[in-house]
């Protein structure tokens, strides 16, 4: 008699055939995500000697003097300054360095006169350096060997080391597949028969691994049980992953959260165009956000731009919330205030989507949980592959296996 093709069987087949083509990509993404989770902690540990300094009996240099010194030595324009909460750590100064380059590419149907008038284009690259704010000494390139390693890890995670337009589509699609795999996996995790849900014994296999069984059973139990324990965290990673890969997903996600795009605030240009000093900007930001924390100052991008000060705290169990405040670049007057705690829920989620995806939302505590969940997620494509590979293969019973061994020995 032919067995009835049930809804559960359909979900099982879809789970299998969606999982197989995405297995390798998901394995790479989960593995690199596991490695990337503690990038800041590892980088700080390995590169401590490169950005730490002594601060005894020293006063901070005037920021205008410090900026001028760095810009003269690096021959670039400062775009932002990062000031760590720990006073023994160096500041990180990012600069835009202009480069001269000839525009490349094929020129179609271009006359000889136009070709002769081709001009050089100005290109800009961004570089960051560790700087001692007490002496103005440049301590070294912020792109250390360890940070370069994690930058490559991120490229592998997001684009598989390919071109963004190609790699991003592959990883983004794999993340969408992961969303389906999580939902279908949860359905399959529930006991097969609804009428047996009332029996406590029917739920036991979903919470533990039968370690004294054969490999096929142990592998199946690990896939099912570990997948359930990591379900919430892996699902969050899967839901936020495509946000960084697809514009349509990002726009849809933002609309779903009820967030509308805000226009950048502007500065009022006075008769005398002299920017306010950064000490004033920092002092005004301190009046708004009086807590101690890590600070980043974004410089005005043009004549009507504003100083943007971002402030956040860090710790073992600290919310990775970024408070922002915008100041007029000529007067230092507050133009806009964006306090994280005052934002509606949807805006809090969209502004923290990166921290939610990487597990940094609640400091080191959540990073540990995400690290373990990502480690489990790395194993799921492997255990899932073995489930498919061993599907339909019947292992001999212990008695038959023993008889076979004895016959082989004769």
Image (tube, rainbow, N blue to C red):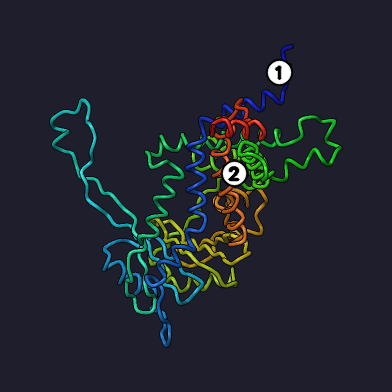
**Quarter holding residue 196:** top right
Front position in the image: 113 or 201:
201
Question: In the picture, which quadrant includes the N terminus?
Answer: top right
Please say if 146 is above or below 190.
below
Q: Mark 1 or mark 2: which is in front?
A: 1
Front position in the image: 135 or 166:
166
Residue drawn at 20 percent across, 43 percent down = 102
Give the image location of residue 88, x and y in percent.
45, 77
Give the image location of residue 78, x and y in percent.
36, 62
Give the image location of residue 7, x and y in percent.
72, 23
Residue drawn at 72 percent across, 41 percent down = 206
Q: Are marks 1 and 2 in contact (CB under 8 Å)?
A: no
Q: In terms of sequence position, does the residue under pointer 1 or pointer 2 come before the other?
A: 1
- Within-10-Å neighbours for mark 1: few <14, some 14–19, many 20+: few
Task: Label 2, secondary structure: give it.
Answer: loop
Q: Give the Cα separation between the discs numbered 1 and 2.
A: 46 Å
Residue underneath mark 1: 5
Residue drawn at 49 percent across, 67 percent down = 332
Give the image location of residue 293, x and y in percent.
55, 69
Residue drawn at 54 percent across, 32 percent down = 410
Q: Which mark is residue 260?
A: 2
Left or right position of 198 against 281: right
């Amino acid at each position: 008699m032919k067995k009835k093709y049930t809804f559960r069987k359909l979900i099982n087949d879809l789970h299998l055939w969606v999982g197989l083509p995405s297995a390798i990509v998901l394995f790479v993404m989960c593995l690199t995500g596991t490695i990337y989770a503690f990038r800041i902690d590892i980088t700080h540990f390995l590169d401590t000697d490169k950005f730490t300094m002594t601060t005894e009996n020293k006063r901070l240099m005037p920021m205008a003097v410090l900026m001028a010194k760095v810009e003269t030595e690096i021959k670039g324009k400062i775009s932002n300054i990062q000031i760590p909460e720990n006073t023994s750590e160096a500041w990180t100064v990012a600069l835009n360095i202009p480069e001269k380059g000839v525009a490349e590419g094929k020129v179609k149907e271009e006359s000889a006169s136009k070709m002769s008038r081709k001009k050089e284009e100005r290109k800009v690259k961004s570089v960051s350096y560790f700087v001692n704010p007490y002496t103005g000494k440049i301590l070294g390139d912020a792109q250390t060997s360890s940070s370069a390693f994690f930058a490559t890890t991120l490229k592998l995670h997001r684009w598989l080391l390919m071109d963004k337009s190609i790699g991003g589509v592959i990883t983004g699609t794999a993340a969408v597949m992961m969303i389906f795999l999580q939902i279908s996996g949860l359905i399959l995790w529930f006991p097969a028969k609804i009428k047996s849900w009332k029996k406590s014994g029917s739920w036991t296999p979903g919470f533990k691994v039968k370690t004294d069984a054969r490999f096929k059973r142990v592998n199946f139990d690990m896939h099912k049980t570990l997948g359930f324990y990591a379900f919430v965290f892996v699902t969050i990673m899967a839901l936020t992953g495509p946000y960084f890969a697809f514009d349509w997903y990002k726009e849809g996600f933002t609309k779903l959260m009820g967030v509308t795009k805000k226009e950048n605030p502007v500065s009022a240009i006075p008769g005398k165009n002299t920017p306010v000093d950064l000490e004033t900007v920092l002092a005004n930001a301190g009046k708004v956000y009086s807590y101690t924390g890590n600070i980043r100052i974004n410089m005005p991008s043009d004549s009507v731009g504003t100083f943007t000060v971002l402030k956040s705290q860090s710790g073992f169990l600290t919310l990775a919330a970024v408070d922002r405040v915008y100041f007029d670049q000529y007067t230092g007057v507050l133009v806009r205030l964006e306090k994280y705690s005052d934002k509606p829920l949807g805006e809090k989620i969209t502004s923290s989507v990166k921290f939610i995806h990487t597990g940094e939302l609640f400091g080191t505590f959540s990073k540990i949980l995400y690290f373990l969940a990502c480690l489990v997620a790395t194993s799921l494509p492997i255990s899932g592959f073995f489930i498919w590979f061993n599907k339909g293969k019947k292992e001999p019973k212990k008695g038959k296996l023993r008889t076979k061994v004895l016959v082989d020995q004769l």
